[in-house]
Image (cartoon, rainbow, N blue to C red):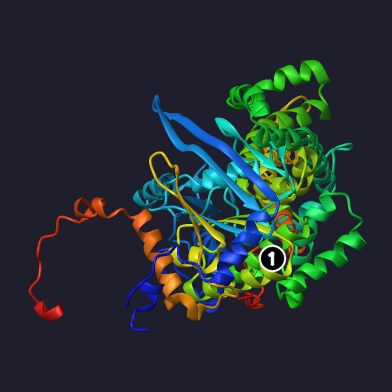
Amino acid sequence: MRIPDYKIQAPAVAERFARLRERPVILDVRGLTKTFVSNGLEHTTLDRISLQVHRREFLCVLGPSGCGKSTLIRIIAGLDSPTSGEVLLDGKHVEGPGPDRGMVFQSYTLFPWLTVKKNVMFGLRMAGQASGVAESEAREWISLVGLSKFENSYPHQLSGGMKQRVAIARALANRPRILLMDEPFGALDAQTRAQMQAYLLDIWRNVDVTILFITHDLDEAVYLSDRILVLGTNPSRVAEIIEDPVPRPRDRAQFVSPPFLATYRRLGELIHPPASEPQERLPMTRMTHVGDDVE
Amino acid sequence: MSARKSERLLVPFGELSPGPQLVLVWLSFLTPLLAWCAVSYLPFVWHPLVRVVDPAEVAYFKPDTLVDRKVFREENAKLAAQGRPLATGVPANPVFLPAPHEVGTALYRSFTTPPRRKGEPWLHESLWHSIRIIFWGFFWSSLFGVPLGILCGTFRGFSKLGEPVVDFFRYMPAPAFGALAVAVMGIYDGPKIAVIVIGTFFQQVLVVANTTRKLDASLVEAAQTLGAGRRQILFQVVLPGIAVDLYNDMRILLGWAWTYLIVAEYIGASSGITYFINQQAKYRIYDNVFAAIIIIGIIGFATDRVLDLLGRALFPWQKSVRPSLLKALFGSRPAPQAA
């Protein structure tokens, strides 16, 4: 099968990107650099990273493990501080964590002593909302993620996928300007992960929210994104920002469509540069002749 | 299920079905009791003495005196050599090892016997006095120790300021402060409570600080991204987050407070259960000494079990609740766990 260039966009897709570029910038990251010292040596994990996320955009940050993508999202969330550079939200400099940047972690981080409903109410209560108002609002978000039956359950009674849906509802209840997701489905099994991806696209379509999504999974990035920002390693710089040519609405049948495969192949080239492969093979010795016909 | 039973008991970190569990729990109480019964009631086990029944012609034997078995045999050998009638006796244990039934009756009798001298406390008064000392010692220690421990665990600055000196004091044995406490607070309850406070407080700060530090840091981060401020994090994330572990720490620390009680009651004017034990030992009524020691055990064990049950009611979100030991002992099956 001939795979087209990943830069070729169908007219509808090109039009969508033109509209996207006209929408206001919500998150503006400028020249973010992070260095740390260990054993007297200075390491640079992030090297002058700049990116912009437009309103209602779904941007994936893709990179191999250890490239500092978690550090990047933690700095944007305000949980780490950069060595230099700055983060602007709606044009204003932000420092420290705040409810305007919701965060969903890989490890669920639900409060085990609170029921599902109380977990979702947490941010609203912090903002000083009366408990009656917070409760009815929390109920709406819980029904959005399809967990109304479980609103009085404790987190340990839920499956991983359900916990992560609660975490998403909890972050959205605060009506953040941007939702930061740090490999949120990384700990889930393949089936649940596929289901969660579909749920997330549904939520994103129905709620006014901008998403910055971190992943190391190429399929996930192509399936979900408007644009994909690829980070290189050592130190990580922005390798390329790709406009995802797969038309919306998305479904899993598109995984074998030409634009999907084209994008997937390009991401593969960026993440695993072909030159580095020969040295990375194991020094194998043959230890069996049983079943020599396996190849 | 080809493995034999003994093998199934020895699977590292393995599970046990309720049946064998129940048997083992009962065994853990019955084994020491049976061993005690064996030593007390089987005349061929231990019994190093002889209780004289008929002294015959041995001048210093009297009915009911306890004599070393070897001495008894030698005296009888002398009598046999002279062709005289022999002394008789039965094997006996030393007076400091009363038999279970004696201690059993003493358990009841010690509450109903009036004190030997006027003005001495009854056993239940002694016990109540001890419990009050424990309560106030643990109360004052916790009032300061728990908040300080939480602050040390939450804020690095408090930890560096507080923990080194606490660690230093921890190694000074609490009883060493006894004489000083008497000089400052007199001879009655003050210094006793002080010794329990000193013995508990420093451990408490460190244990609570460690428990606080073990709180999953990502919960605090999640709360920050949800807009929680410093106060809110302390009271709505750290406190509920460590509540279960803190509660269990307190149960263990309360046990330590009991061990300091006996030392504390020696300080100044001896009082409480320690005074009772000492008096009974002076009168050589060892049945009562054992009874008192067992009562301390029962009170401690019962308190711990009640706190355990209370903990289950207080913290319904706990992931894996161990079946209650009380329930296990009295046979009701552990509740099935939610999937």
Q: Is residue A149 left or right of residue B15?
A: right
Query: Residue A294 at x, y = what percent?
Result: 15, 79
Count of number-bearing discs: 1
- A51 vs A68, left or right, is right
Occupied quadrant, residue A42: top left
- Tell me if residue B212 comes above or below residue B10 in the rendering: above
Question: Foreground residue, B73 or A81?
Answer: A81
Left or right of residue B44, residue B59 in this image: right
For this rendering, which residue is in front, A80 or B275?
Answer: A80
The x, y position of residue A271, in whole percent, is 37, 54
Quadrant where the image shows the N terminus of chain B: bottom left
Q: Let me know if residue A283 appears in the view.
A: yes
Q: Is residue A83 above or below residue A28?
A: above
Q: Which residue is mark 1?
A: A166
Question: What residue is shown at x 70% (from left), y 72% (from top)?
Answer: A145
Residue B13 visible somewhere in the drawing: no
Q: Kindly give the residue lying farthest to the left in the view shown.
A: A289
Q: Quadrant of residue B37?
A: bottom right
Residue at figure coordinates x 47%, y 73% from the top left: A190
Image coordinates of residue B261 in percent, x first then y, are 71, 37
The C terminus of chain B: image quadrant: bottom right
Question: Residue at the bottom extreme?
Answer: B1
Residue ID at (77%, 32%): B144
User: As rendered, which of A187 and B330 lies closer to the eye?
Assistant: A187
- Tag 1, which secondary structure? helix
Crowding near the residue tagged with mark 1, few <14, some 14–19, many ≥20 C-alpha atoms within 10 Å: many
Q: Identity of the amino acid at label 1?
A: Val
Chain for disc number 1: A
**Is residue A132 left or right of B325 when viewed as pictured?**
right
